[in-house]
Amino acid sequence: MLSPTWKSTFGRKATWEEADVTTVATSVLNELPADIKALVSEGNFKSDTIIGIKDEVGWNVCEKDIRNNYVILKPFVQWSPASVPSAFFAADVLIKLNSLLHNKLFACREEFVVPRATKEGGKIKKLIGALRALYRHARLGKCHEITSLKSYLLPSPTRSRNRQAAESAEE
């Protein structure tokens, strides 16, 4: 249900609507395994992080990080196949997901939900950026999850225009 008072974490500059956020959040919820949904709905999910990255300090991501976050990344990649979504969009999705899970996703007081969602949104952006870099290198991945995520991606319109301009200049 759309809220008349909904505001993006990015403010008025947001190019997305609440309907976009709700669509992706609902898709993430549908992708979550039943045992994870049960863990969260019972209030037993007490982790400080939602997006697992091995290098929590520098956020240097590897293929294993992408694979481990497959169920969360898939709806984002499907929604934005030609570009990396904003960290603020990802934060909005996580806040909506928290709402769909009856505010049990983030194990913190309400005033800390937005900062935590924004941090986790940054990780999502970083992971999808790394996935797009892998996509540019090769269309197939080393595992099923990465190949599946790559299958949703499209070439970046910006990079395609840049490549076409460079090819035209060479002629």
Image (spheres, grey):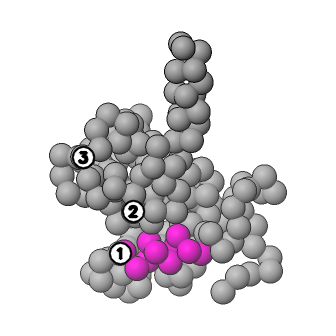
Q: Which residue is mark 1?
A: 32
Rendered view: 92 above or below 34:
above
Residue 132 vertical position relative to residue 49 in the rendered view, above or below: above
* Label 1 vs label 3, nearer the camera: 3
For mark 1, give the secondary structure: loop
**Disc 3 marks which residue?**
140
Q: Residue 117: percent from the left, percent from the top? A: 56, 59
Kindly identify the residue that appears in the image at 52 percent across and 27 percent down.
Answer: 163
Q: Position of residue 29 (x, y in %)?
A: 43, 77
Q: How many marks?
A: 3
- Within-10-Å neighbours for mark 1: few <14, some 14–19, many 20+: some
**Which residue is painted at 52% across and 63% down in the image?**
79
| Of labels 1 and 2, the one closer to you | 2
Q: What is the secondary structure assignment of the residue under circle 3?
A: loop
Q: CA distance from mark 1 to mark 3?
A: 24 Å
Q: x, y (%) of residue 64?
A: 24, 48
Q: Identify the mark at residue 74; answer none if there is no mark.
A: 2
The segment highlighted magenta reads: 22-31
Question: Distance between the Cα atoms at labels 1 and 2?
Answer: 11 Å
**Residue 161 in sight in this render:** yes
Q: Residue at x 53, y 35 (%)?
A: 160
In terms of image quadrants, where is residue 144? bottom left
- Magenta region, mostly helix, strand or loop? helix
